[in-house]
Image (cartoon, rainbow, N blue to C red):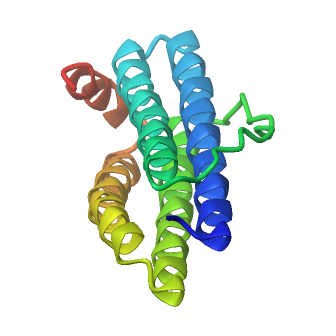
């Protein structure tokens, strides 16, 4: 059985994951509006991944006898100055999610919930990859100028 504290922590993280899905979808439409369909495709995949994370977490809570509470999702931003600013926001958001996952893991340890701790490790490892990928995109844009977005758009379309 999942404790009330763990249930609350997972419900909070589920809300974070749903917000993440929404922000990436908003970013995708923004990039699509600028004509960067490859970037939009990549961001839609990110959105789908975040939605899947929310589903996995919700199923985990239910499988442990807990209750999933669907909370209000905060409205997301829908405008960025340029692609670099947008992808910097992606990187910063992934760092935020990493901290949220680390906090969830810490709560599982605090509660002595080994099943929740083991479950969280998958997301800890995934966040390392997410930060590296989004940070790499930012680096490419910074080091190669705004023109790099054309090449990135082409590469991102193949995700």
| Image position of 53 (left or right of 77) | left
- In the picture, residue 113 is in which quadrant? bottom left
Above or below — where is 54 with respect to 61?
A: above
84 or 59, nearer to the observer: 59
| Image position of 62 (left or right of 18) | left
x, y (%) of residue 146?
A: 43, 37
| Image position of 105 (left or right of 134) | right
Above or below — where is 126 with respect to 137?
A: below
Which residue is depicted at the point 58% across and 11% down?
A: 33
Q: In the rendered view of the protein, which quadrant contains the C terminus?
A: top left
- In the picture, residue 105 is in which quadrant? bottom left
Number of labelled discs? Answer: 0
x, y (%) of residue 49?
A: 39, 35
| Image position of 21 (left or right of 132) | right
5 or 145, nearer to the observer: 5
101 or 120, nearer to the observer: 120
- In the picture, residue 20 is in which quadrant? top right
Which residue is depicted at the point 47% across and 48% down?
A: 57
123 or 23, nearer to the observer: 123
């Amino acid at each position: 059985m999942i404790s009330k504290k763990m249930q609350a922590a997972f419900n909070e993280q589920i809300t974070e994951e749903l917000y993440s899905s929404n922000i990436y979808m908003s970013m995708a439409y923004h990039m699509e509006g600028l004509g960067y369909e490859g970037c939009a495709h990549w961001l839609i995949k990110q959105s789908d991944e975040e939605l899947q994370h929310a589903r996995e977490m919700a199923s985990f809570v239910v499988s442990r006898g807990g209750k999933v509470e669907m909370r209000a999702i905060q409205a997301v931003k829908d405008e960025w100055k340029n692609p670099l600013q947008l992808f910097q926001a992606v990187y910063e958001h992934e760092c935020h999610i990493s901290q949220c996952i680390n906090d969830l893991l810490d709560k599982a340890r605090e509660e002595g919930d080994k099943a929740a701790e083991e479950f969280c490790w998958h997301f800890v490892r995934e966040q390392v990859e997410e930060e590296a990928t989004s940070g790499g995109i930012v680096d490419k844009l910074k080091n190669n100028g705004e023109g790099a977005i054309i090449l990135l758009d082409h590469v991102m379309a193949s995700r």
